[in-house]
Amino acid sequence: MKLYEFFGGPSNEADNDPRDDLSGKTQLEKEKLADELYWFILDDDHLHKECFMPIAREIAEKQKSGKFDHGEYLDKWLPMVNKGCLKYYKEHKMTEDPRDVFSKELRKGLCQRLADQHHRDIEKGEYKLG
């Protein structure tokens, strides 16, 4: 018996989360992949040095000058997300087509999530950007 069954949760996740006709994955599987990718990207020091720091410096300068627009910088995170997805793909030795695994919707969601978290942190001055 699973813990959520013991506490009265759904007994069969598949009944409550049907598979997508195109990808064959459930919504829970997609969300799990998005979470894993998010933390994978955050934990990768090389991605931070190569992609994060230049974006963070640019955002900090714009925030100081008062010309920062949150929506304008969502797409700036895409190179970091793309590199993170490919690195994740290689490290986990995945065999599916990367374009199918890492949909545009998934990558845009990761950009949004990174932007929402890090724009606030940069504004608070939580990173040494010098």
Image (spheres, helix red, strand yellow):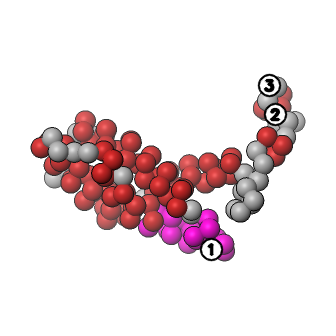
Residues at marks 1 and 2 touching, judged by CB atoms closer than 8 Å: no
Label 1 crowd (10 A; few <14 / some 14-19 / many >=20): few
Q: Which mark is residue 21?
A: none
Q: Measured along the vertical axis of the image, is residue 107 above or below residue 17? A: below
Q: Which residue: 66% across, 72% down? A: 96
Q: Which residue: 44% across, 67% down? A: 83
Whole-percent x and y of residue 51?
Answer: 33, 62
Label 2 crowd (10 A; few <14 / some 14-19 / many >=20): few
Residue behind mark 1: 97
Label 3 crowd (10 A; few <14 / some 14-19 / many >=20): few
Q: Which residues are magenta?
A: 83-101
Closer-to-camera residue (75/37): 75
Q: Secondary structure at mark 2?
A: loop
Whole-percent x and y of residue 105?
Answer: 54, 56
Q: CA distance from mark 2 to mark 3?
A: 9 Å
**Amino acid residing under circle 3:** Phe
Q: Which mark is residue 10?
A: 2
Q: Which residue: 70% across, 62% down? A: 23
69 in magenta: no
In the picture, measured across the screen, residue 50 lies left or right of residue 113, that is: left
Mark toward the viewer: 3 or 1: 1
84 in magenta: yes
Mark toward the viewer: 2 or 3: 2
Q: Which mark is residue 7?
A: 3
N-terminal of the two: label 1 or label 2? 2
In the picture, measured across the screen, residue 33 lies left or right of residue 65, that is: right
Residue 12 can be seen in this image: yes
Q: Measured along the vertical axis of the image, is residue 70 above or below residue 108? A: above
The quarter of the displayed image where residue 2 is located: top right
The quarter of the displayed image where residue 25 is located: bottom right
Q: Measured along the vertical axis of the image, is residue 33 above or below residue 90? A: above
Q: Measured along the vertical axis of the image, is residue 102 above or below residue 15? A: below
